[in-house]
Amino acid sequence: MTTATIIDFDTQTTARAPERIMPQKVGSALWAPMFAVSLMGFAVGFVLAIVKANLIASGGDPLDIAAVSQ
């Protein structure tokens, strides 16, 4: 490994690519679970929107409508 000095910063030259850093490792391990959670959250929000719209359309109790909104 050699070190070359450039005007503003030091660089290092290696024979092979550097290893992945921790955020890259975590990101590659957790992308699928995070994507699954986002799909589930979208589905739950969509169902709650349908329930709320049904309560409003049928003239439901305002307290029930407010409870679904929370």
Image (cartoon, grey):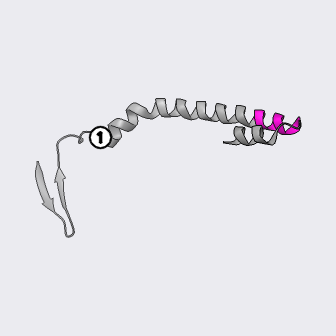
Q: In which quarter of the image is residue 53?
A: top right
Q: Is residue 57 left or right of residue 27?
A: right
What secondary structure predominates along the stretch shown in magenta?
Answer: helix
Which residue is farthest bottom? 7
Q: Which of 6 and 39 is in front in this view?
A: 39
> Hey, which quadrant is residue 21 in on the image?
top left
**Direction from residue 55 to residue 10 in the image, left or right:** left
Q: Residues within 10 Å of mark 1 (few under 14, many from 20)?
A: few
Q: How many circles with numbers are drawn on the protein?
A: 1
Front-lying residue, 57 or 46: 57
Residue farthest along the left direction in this orientation:
2
Residue 17, image x, y percentages: 24, 41
Horizontally, is 28 left or right of 33 in the view? left
> For this rendering, which residue is in front, 20 or 53?
53
| Residue drawn at 88 percent across, 38 percent down | 59
Vertical side of 50 occupied by 9: above or below:
below
Q: Quadrant of the C terminus?
A: top right
In the image, what residue type sits under mark 1? Answer: Met
- Magenta highlight on residue 41: no
The residue range painted magenta reads 50-58
What x and y, as percent, mark residue 62?
80, 42
Q: Is residue 2 above or below residue 5?
A: above
Circle 1 residue: 22
Q: Residue at x 33, y 36 (%)?
A: 25
At x 42%, y 33%, the residue is: 30
Q: Where is residue 31 in the image (x, y as percent from the top left)?
A: 45, 34
Asked which secondary structure carries label 1, the reply is: helix
